[in-house]
Amino acid sequence: GNSVTQMEGPVTLSEEAFLTINCTYTATGYPSLFWYVQYPGEGLQLLLKATKADDKGSNKGFEATYRKETTSFHLEKGSVQVSDSAVYFCALSKTGANNLFFGTGTRLTVIP
Amino acid sequence: GAGVSQSPRYKVAKRGQDVALRCDPISGHVSLFWYQQALGQGPEFLTYFQNEAQLDKSGLPSDRFFAERPEGSVSTLKIQRTQQEDSAVYLCASSSGTSGSKETQYFGPGTRLLVL
C-alpha cells in the first residue's frame, strides 16, 4: 500500500539552526511528493513539491530532493527562523490517483 | 481571490445527532476533496469529486458518512447519527484540474467537530 513515515516530533531548535525533518515513503510506481505546512491557527498550505525522481522542490529557503533509491523526501532548511514554527506534513500522491497520503506531521518550534 | 472556505469552523454535537459541514472551493476548481484529521495525526482521505461526480468514496469510514456536490461547486459532508469517534477536524481541499497526482491541492481551514 501507500504510506508516508515522518520523523517524530516535536522538534525544538534555536533560531538560525539547521533543520532536517526526515520523510520516507512506500508506494508503487512513481508518486509525486509534497511537503505541506500548517502554521498556528491556519489551514494546510503547500510548501514545496517534486513530481519525479531527483527533482528538488524549494520554497522560502526550504528544500527537499526526491530520492527514489532511498524512497525519501527529507525537508531541510539552512537557517530556521521563529516564524518557521509550525507543523510540517510530508505527503504523497500515487500516480493515477487524486488523493494525498499524509504522514503524521512533525511539530517544529524555533526559539529566539 | 478567495481561498477555500469551510463552515462552521467549530461544531459540537451530541452523540446521535446529524451534522452537515459545508465547503466552498476556489471558484472554477474542478476537483474537490474531503479529508478527516484526528488529533495528532495527518489528514486521511475521505472522498473526491470531479465537478458534480463523486469519483472516489473509498475513504468514507461508514455508511453514516455522505457527501454531495450537486452543482459542481459547493460541497456538503453529512454525518448521520454521530459517534464520539467522529470527533476530528474535517478538511476540504480543491484543485484546478483533473490531472491528479501532480496538482496542488488548496486546503480550507477545516471544521473542528466534537461529538459529546
Image (cartoon, grey):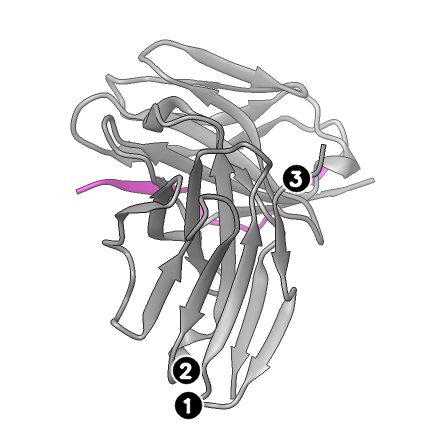
Q: Secondary structure at mark 3?
A: loop
Q: CA distance from mark 2 to mark 1?
A: 5 Å
Give residue B68's quadrant in the image: bottom left
Label 2's element?
loop
Residue sitting at the far top: A54
> Tag on residue B36?
none
At label 3, the amino acid type is Gly
Which is more N-terminal, label 3 or label 1? Answer: 3
Extreme-right residue of the structure: A112
Q: Residue at x 44, y 27 (%)?
A: A74
Q: Which residues are magenta?
A: A1-14
* Letter of the chain that mark 3 sits on in the rendering: B
Label whose residue precedes the other's in the sequence (2 or 1) = 1
Q: Could you tell me residue B116's position as x and y percent? A: 52, 89
Relative horizontal placement of residue A61, taking residue B59 as reference (left or right): right
Instruction: Give the percent coordinates (x, y) of residue A48.
Output: 53, 24
- Dot 1 falls on a residue whose secondary structure is loop
**What residue is at 33 percent from the left and 17 percent from the top?**
A67
- Tag 1 residue: B16
Tell me: residue A15, above or below residue B68: above
User: In front: A68, or B51?
Assistant: B51
- Seen in the image, is B37 located left or right of residue A107? left
* Residue that carries the numbered disc 3 in the rendered image: B3
Residue type at tag 2: Thr
